């Protein structure tokens, strides 16, 4: 019987290009161990992004390729993931207990950014990550209603807040601290200060990702936040129509200026499917998100339909990803989540936590 070599196994694994990393698993250092015993091959794969919905497909693809090697009798592939902390803007330090902050932004209101943000956070959680969401829209906080959370957060020490929890998601919003119908008549500096407090004075617990639902627009508040919050990556939400795309470009450029990597674009309300006859119609135009992504060299993470069930479930406090977890739209969100997280996993990592603090004392 032919003896199987490690090089043969590596070569077989290299034939498979991961659809989310868009690279092979050997060059991305995802293959951690290869053991060969009498025709039995065992492979350990550790991804840098959560992939509960993709792990078995990946394992099966590798098993098929390795079995073709002469002399291989049995193959075992173990797929897991470990999410690292990634680099943030210069002069900023990552947040304690938060490995990565992902900002979800739009150049203008009305494109469904908050709905995308909450479903993205829930999708990352469904894929196997510890996730939190910060509702940074001080003037129009919507996450408390979307997550079906009522009540006020606790403060055990009188200084910091405990995050509210819904569907395994840690959440914080100004909406938990004020009445739903109370208008916030605040100027920009007050808004920025309130957000810094919500971000820094919440006791986030071991988060892989904190999704920040940014207020719409590209004004002073958004720019200040982009400069002061340690963000690992941003996602731009737009609709296909030209007016929305114009403003989405501004949001994209703003993040580029403050050196925040843009993970990609999500095109929301890309197509309307009639609930009565199934007719498909591009109400807001077609292909705008793809053109924007191509123009700026970023990825189109996904296109979501204009669907009444998304609004109904989110308004009812049970967003689509948890309301219909096996449904087509929930799977779209999970696909977007895997794409965004995989894109982030290829970026530079943050090693500051590994270096010891050097203290000089006079003795």
Image (spheres, grey):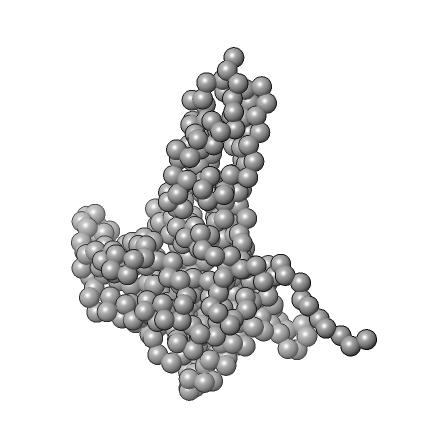
Residue 318 spot, x, y in % from top left: 44, 58
In the rendered image, is residue 307 in sight? Answer: no
- Residue at screen point 41% across, 66% down: 260
Residue 249 spot, x, y in % from top left: 28, 67
Residue 73 spot, x, y in % from top left: 51, 19
- Residue at screen point 29% across, 71% down: 250
Q: Nearer the viewer, residue 26 or 287?
A: 26
In the rendered image, is residue 86 in sight? Answer: yes
State whether residue 287 is above or below residue 175. Answer: above
Q: Quadrant of the C terminus?
A: bottom right
State whether residue 66 is above or below residue 345. Answer: above
Residue 158 spot, x, y in % from top left: 66, 78
- Residue at screen point 78% across, 77% down: 362
> Hey, which quadrant is residue 214 in on the image?
bottom left
Outermost residue, top side: 1
Q: Is residue 156 left or right of residue 123?
A: right
Number of numbered tags placed on the structure image: 0
State whether residue 238 is above or below residue 51. Answer: below
Q: Nearer the viewer, residue 187 or 163?
A: 187
Q: Nearer the viewer, residue 153 or 72?
A: 72
Q: Is residue 5 left or right of residue 259?
A: right
Outermost residue, right side: 363
State whether residue 163 is above or below residue 72. Answer: below
- Residue at screen point 43% across, 78% down: 224
């Amino acid at each position: 019987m032919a003896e199987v070599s490690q090089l043969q196994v590596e070569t077989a694994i290299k034939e498979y290009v991961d659809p989310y990393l868009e690279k092979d698993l050997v060059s991305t250092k995802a293959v951690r161990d290869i053991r060969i015993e009498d025709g039995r091959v065992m492979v350990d794969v550790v991804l840098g992004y959560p992939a509960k919905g993709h792990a078995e497909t990946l394992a099966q693809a590798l098993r098929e390729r390795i079995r073709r090697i002469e002399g291989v009798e049995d193959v075992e592939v173990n797929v897991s993931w470990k999410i690292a902390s990634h680099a943030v803007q210069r002069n900023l330090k990552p947040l304690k207990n938060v490995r990565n902050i992902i900002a979800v932004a739009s150049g203008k209101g009305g494109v469904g950014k908050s709905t995308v943000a909450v479903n993205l956070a829930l999708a990352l959680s469904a894929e196997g990550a510890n996730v939190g969401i910060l509702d940074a829209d001080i003037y129009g906080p919507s996450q408390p209603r979307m997550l079906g959370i009522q009540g006020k957060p606790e403060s055990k020490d009188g200084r910091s807040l405990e995050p509210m929890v819904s569907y395994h998601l840690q959440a914080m919003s100004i909406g938990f601290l004020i009445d739903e119908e109370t208008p916030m008549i605040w100027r920009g500096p007050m808004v920025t200060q309130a957000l810094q407090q919500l971000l820094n004075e919440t006791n986030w617990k071991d988060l892989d990702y904190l999704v920040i639902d940014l207020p719409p627009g590209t004004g002073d508040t958004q720019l200040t936040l982009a400069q002061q919050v340690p963000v690992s990556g941003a996602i731009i939400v737009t609709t296909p129509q030209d007016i929305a795309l114009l403003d989405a470009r501004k949001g994209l450029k703003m993040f580029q200026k403050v050196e925040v990597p843009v993970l990609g674009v999500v095109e929301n309300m890309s197509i309307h499917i009639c609930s009565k006859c199934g007719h498909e119609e591009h109400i807001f135009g077609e292909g705008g998100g793809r053109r924007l992504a191509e123009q700026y060299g970023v990825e189109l993470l996904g296109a979501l339909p204009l669907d009444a069930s998304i609004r109904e479930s989110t308004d009812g406090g049970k967003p689509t990803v948890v309301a219909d977890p096996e449904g087509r739209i929930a799977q779209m969100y999970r696909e977007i989540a895997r794409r965004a997280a995989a894109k982030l996993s290829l970026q530079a990592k943050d090693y500051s936590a590994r270096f010891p603090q050097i203290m000089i004392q006079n003795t």
